[in-house]
C-alpha cells in the first residue's frame, strides 16, 4: 500500500486506545455469523467484528479489524490467506470540483476520534448519516436481484477536510462469490466532487507486476524501467484510457493485475519486512466497471522498496495502487475481485466469458 502498513498500524493502535476507551479490542469482539452462505454480524447489540461477504468467498471489513483506520479491508480466505489477513485494502480518495489534489481516507486526521484515518461505520439504509460506533455494525440486508441472492450494506465515511462527504454501498452477489460491488455516493452535506476514487492500495503485498490490457500485457519492470521514483518511493501514475482496457461482451471495462511469481508464498521476507510475507496461492486482482464513463481511465503506480524502509521488494518493482477513475456520478459502481483463476477467464456480469490477452 501507499503508506507503511506497520507504521500506520502502530499509529492507529495508539489512536484507537483513545477512541474506544472501555470498548473491547478487535480480538474481543464477537465473531460474525454464517447464514445462508453469507458472513455478516449477528443480530443484537453485541459489539461485533464489522465484516460482510460470502462464507466461501470474498469479504469486506472495517476498523477496528487489523489495519489502518479509514480503509476497507479485503479478505480472500479461499486463496489460502490466514484468518483476518488482508490481501488488499481499498481507500476512498475524493477530489472536489475546482481542485486536483486528493484527500486520503487513511491519512487525514479524524475529527471524530484521535489520530489518523477517517471513521467508517455501517447502516442498512442510506437515510441517516450520523456517525455510529463501528463495533456495533449493521447486519446488511439480504435481497434478490434478477433471481440472484444479494447482501447489501451501506458504509458511512467521516467528512473530509476538503468538504467531500461520501457514503458507499457494498453489494455481494451469490453468483459472483469472489468479488464485491462498491458504489459511491455524496452525502447531502458534501461539496461537489469531481471524482471519488476507490483505489486498491497494497499491490506490493501480492507483488503485482503484470497488467493485462486489451493490446497486451504490460509489466511494472517495462513500464518503470527509466522511471524517477519520488522521495516517498512512488512513481508517478501511469494512465491507460478506456481504449486500452479489456472490454467484456456487454461493454464492461476490466483492469486485471497478477504477480509474475509462480509461488509468491515461497518467497521469504527478511526479518525487517516480515510483515509483508505473502500467504496462499497467487491470485488475479481486478477492477471492473460494468457501465464505463467515456472518460474512464485506469491508473497504477509502483514502488521498489516497502514504504518507510530501505527494504527492497523481492523481485523488484511492483505495482502498489490499482484503480479505475472517472468523473463522479452518484451511484457510480466499481467491482473489485480476487480470484485464483487466470485473468483470461474473467467473466462479465452476464456470465459470458471474455479472454484477456
Image: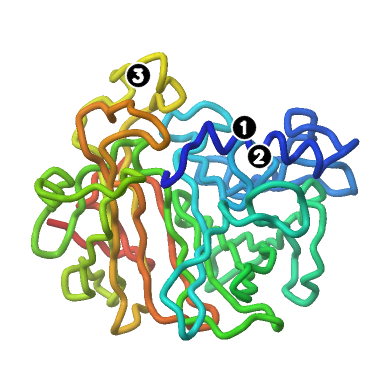
Q: CA distance from mark 2 to mark 3?
A: 24 Å
Q: 265 above or below 68? A: above
Q: 282 above or below 338? A: above
Q: Quadrant of residue 292?
A: bottom left
Q: Where does residue 284 sit, x and y in percent of width and height?
A: 31, 45
Identify the residue at image location x=81%, y=53%: 133
Q: CA distance from mark 1 to mark 2?
A: 5 Å
- Secondary element at image label 1: helix
Coloring basis for residues:
rainbow
Circles 2 and 3, Cβ within 8 Å, touching? The answer is no
Residue 290's label in the rendered image is none
Q: 279 above or below 333? A: above
Task: Please indicate whether residue 243 sits to the left or right of residue 147 in the image.
Answer: left
The residue that disc 3 covers is: 269
Disc 1 crowd, CA 10 A, few/some/many (<14, 14-19, 20+): some
The residue that disc 1 covers is: 10
Comparing 347 with 287, the one in front is 287
- Secondary element at image label 2: helix
Disc 2 crowd, CA 10 A, few/some/many (<14, 14-19, 20+): many
Of callouts 2 and 3, the N-terminal one: 2
Of callouts 3 and 1, the N-terminal one: 1
Q: Where does residue 304 sit, x and y in percent of width and height?
A: 25, 37
Identify the residue at image location x=41%, y=75%: 100
Q: Quadrant of the C terminus?
A: bottom left
- Secondary element at image label 3: loop
Residue 12's label in the rendered image is 2
Q: CA distance from mark 3 to mark 1?
A: 20 Å
Q: How many marks?
A: 3
Identify the residue at image location x=62%, y=32%: 10
Amino acid at each position: 500500500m501507499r503508506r507503511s502498513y506497520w507504521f500506520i498500524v502502530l499509529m492507529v493502535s495508539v489512536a484507537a486506545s483513545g477512541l474506544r476507551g472501555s470498548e473491547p479490542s478487535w480480538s474481543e469482539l464477537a465473531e460474525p455469523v454464517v447464514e445462508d452462505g453469507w458472513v455478516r454480524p449477528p443480530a443484537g447489540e453485541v459489539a461485533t467484528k464489522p465484516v460482510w461477504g460470502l462464507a466461501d468467498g470474498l469479504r469486506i471489513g472495517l476498523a477496528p479489524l487489523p489495519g489502518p483506520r479509514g480503509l476497507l479491508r479485503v479478505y480472500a480466505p479461499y486463496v489460502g490467506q490466514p484468518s483476518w489477513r488482508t490481501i488488499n485494502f481499498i481507500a476512498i480518495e475524493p477530489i472536489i470540483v475546482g481542485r486536483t489534489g486528493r484527500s486520503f481516507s487513511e491519512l487525514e486526521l479524524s475529527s471524530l476520534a484521535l489520530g489518523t484515518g477517517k471513521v467508517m461505520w455501517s447502516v442498512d439504509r442510506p437515510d441517516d448519516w450520523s456517525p455510529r460506533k463501528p463495533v456495533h455494525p449493521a447486519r446488511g440486508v439480504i435481497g434478490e436481484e434478477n433471481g440472484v441472492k444479494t447482501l447489501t450494506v451501506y458504509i458511512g465515511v467521516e467528512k473530509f477536510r476538503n468538504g467531500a462527504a461520501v457514503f458507499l454501498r457494498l453489494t455481494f452477489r451469490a453468483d459472483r462469490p469472489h468479488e464485491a460491488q462498491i458504489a459511491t455516493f455524496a452525502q447531502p452535506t458534501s461539496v461537489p466532487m469531481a471524482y471519488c476514487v476507490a483505489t486498491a492500495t497494497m499491490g506490493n503485498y501480492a507483488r503485482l507486476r503484470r497488467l493485462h490490457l486489451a493490446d497486451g500485457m504490460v509489466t511494472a519492470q517495462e513500464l518503470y524501467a527509466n522511471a524517477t521514483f519520488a522521495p516517498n518511493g512512488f512513481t508517478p501514475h501511469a494512465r491507460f484510457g478506456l481504449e486500452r482496457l479489456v472490454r467484456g461482451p456487454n461493454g464492461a471495462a476490466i483492469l486485471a493485475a497478477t504477480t509474475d511469481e509462480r509461488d509468491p508464498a515461497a518467497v521469504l521476507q527478511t526479518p525487517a519486512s516480515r510483515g509483508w510475507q505473502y500467504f496462499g496461492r497467487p491470485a488475479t486482482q481486478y477492477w471492473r466497471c460494468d457501465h464505463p464513463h467515456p472518460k474512464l481511465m485506469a491508473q497504477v503506480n509502483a514502488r521498489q522498496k516497502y514504504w518507510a524502509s530501505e527494504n527492497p521488494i523481492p523481485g523488484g518493482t511492483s505495482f502498489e495502487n490499482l484503480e479505475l477513475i472517472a468523473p463522479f456520478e452518484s451511484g457510480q459502481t466499481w467491482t473489485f475481485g480476487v480470484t485464483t483463476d487466470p485473468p483470461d477467464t474473467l467473466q462479465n456480469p452476464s456470465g459470458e466469458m471474455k479472454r484477456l490477452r
